[in-house]
Amino acid sequence: MEPTPRRGRPRSEGADARILDAALELLVDRGYDRFSVDEAAGRAGVAKTTLYRRWPTRDHLIVAVVARLQDAVPVEYSGDVRADLTRYLGEIVAGLNRMRRAGRPATSGDGSAGLVAEVVAAAARHADVGAAVQAMFRRRNALVLRLLEQARESGELRADVEPEALFDQLAGALYYRLLITGGPLDAEYVDRLLAGALRGASA
Amino acid sequence: MEPTPRRGRPRSEGADARILDAALELLVDRGYDRFSVDEAAGRAGVAKTTLYRRWPTRDHLIVAVVARLQDAVPVEYSGDVRADLTRYLGEIVAGLNRMRRAGRPATSGDGSAGLVAEVVAAAARHADVGAAVQAMFRRRNALVLRLLEQARESGELRADVEPEALFDQLAGALYYRLLITGGPLDAEYVDRLLAGALRGASA
DNA sequence: CCATTTACGCAACGGCAGTAGCGAAATAAG
DNA sequence: CTTATTTCGCTACTGCCGTTGCGTAAATGG
């Protein structure tokens, strides 16, 4: 894991960051489908071969750009699961709606899943991207899973509730709506979702 | 809706079917990422321009191929919602697992979402494809929504259950697992899923 | 019969993803 | 200092998507 001092010429220090910056800017400017690796390299002031040594496909590059934007969402158990989940899912939904706009082509409708769908497809196409995306989601959701466990231990949730399964239902409904049914993602939907899911989970 | 007799030369009668047949065969042979429009047209014995007059992009063509494979899943209320849903979701899961294999590149892992992810991405890229995909899902799920309503009317489900929201949670968890967490989709998971979801929905 | 309209096959093209080959530059080891 | 190793920029290439232009075929309307 340490930077073992290697034999040949070292990698250009700031090149990675410069490429990712240029790629993000280009992605916002042009949208996903008009995003070109050549132009990203050009804007970063780097040869295309240099870029491809770091990210072997366009998919890898774009997922790397998106991954940099994902922060961990802080959340802590307050004693009221429903309130905590409302806030947490609200932030997830806000992030998803932001990713709808970014990288959307003109031919795409208003309910488009935008970049999220592209990331999902990239994860399906390349095993290593898939592993990275899954790790991204695990990191993102680790805290909220811990929260659900605390709520169960404290007796607010039934003892036979499986936190992972419960969260999969919540997140699943959000992504299903975003990626497939195309319906709006807003606070009202989050409320309805939690009403149904917590009905059978509360003690 | 009737075939209004148009002015010029009519579309070649069997061309649509021949192209779709050839495209499906090619998709199975080569997988999604080695699928080429040129070769599909070649195998169908048709000029590329003829193909593009019918499906304006590769995405449109592939979604059309997949759509032909989707049958309506018959389901009827038996008086036992859980048994009915187990069977229905079991068939959905079997179909999804079939689509995992089809069109998977060599670089993709075993938990890949395969064609499903590509269809989702195509739906996000083109508004008309998105509308077609949503319609496909609505048709597919119409019967099971009716079933849930019957179960509510009969008193097996609580009166305050919203069939649509409940089904979104079930389907959402399946697709979330397929597209994002990458976990296995099997009968055991369906059982756990239904256990959690029906706990709060049963009267 | 003739003009119009639309579909067809064919060939060529521009643009982008990804690869290969080259000489030059930057480092570590002897 | 010399050699081996790795990265760099550059150029050129293949393959595929999607478009364009052209001559021809098949239909309708006058």
Image: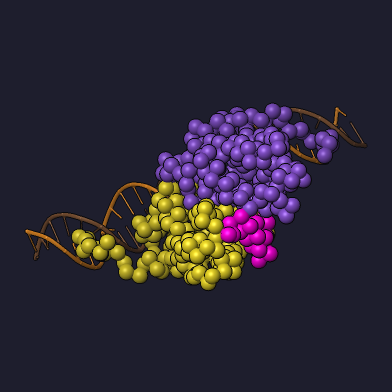
Chain colours: A purple, B yellow, C brown, D orange
Q: Quadrant of residue B177?
A: bottom right
Q: Quadrant of residue A154?
A: top right
Q: Which residues are magenta?
A: B181-203
Position of A152 with respect to B99 (left or right) is right
Foreground of the two, A34 or B118: B118
User: Which secondary structure is most common in the magenta stretch?
Assistant: helix
Residue at screen point 59% across, 66% down = B82
| Count of picture labels | 0
Regarding residue B152, the answer to whether it shows in the image is yes
Position of B82 with respect to B77 (left or right) is right
The C terminus of chain B, quarter of image? bottom right
Residue at screen point 60% across, 39% down = A86
Give the answer, above or below, for where D14 lies relative to B99: above
Q: Is residue B196 magenta?
A: yes
The N terminus of chain B, quarter of image? bottom left
Foreground of the two, B134 or A122: B134
Q: Is residue A131 magenta?
A: no
Q: How far across and how far down the image is residue D5, in percent? A: 80, 41
Foreground of the two, B13 or D4: B13
Q: How far across and how far down the image is residue A106, in percent? A: 42, 40
Give the answer, above or below, for where B151 lies relative to A1: below
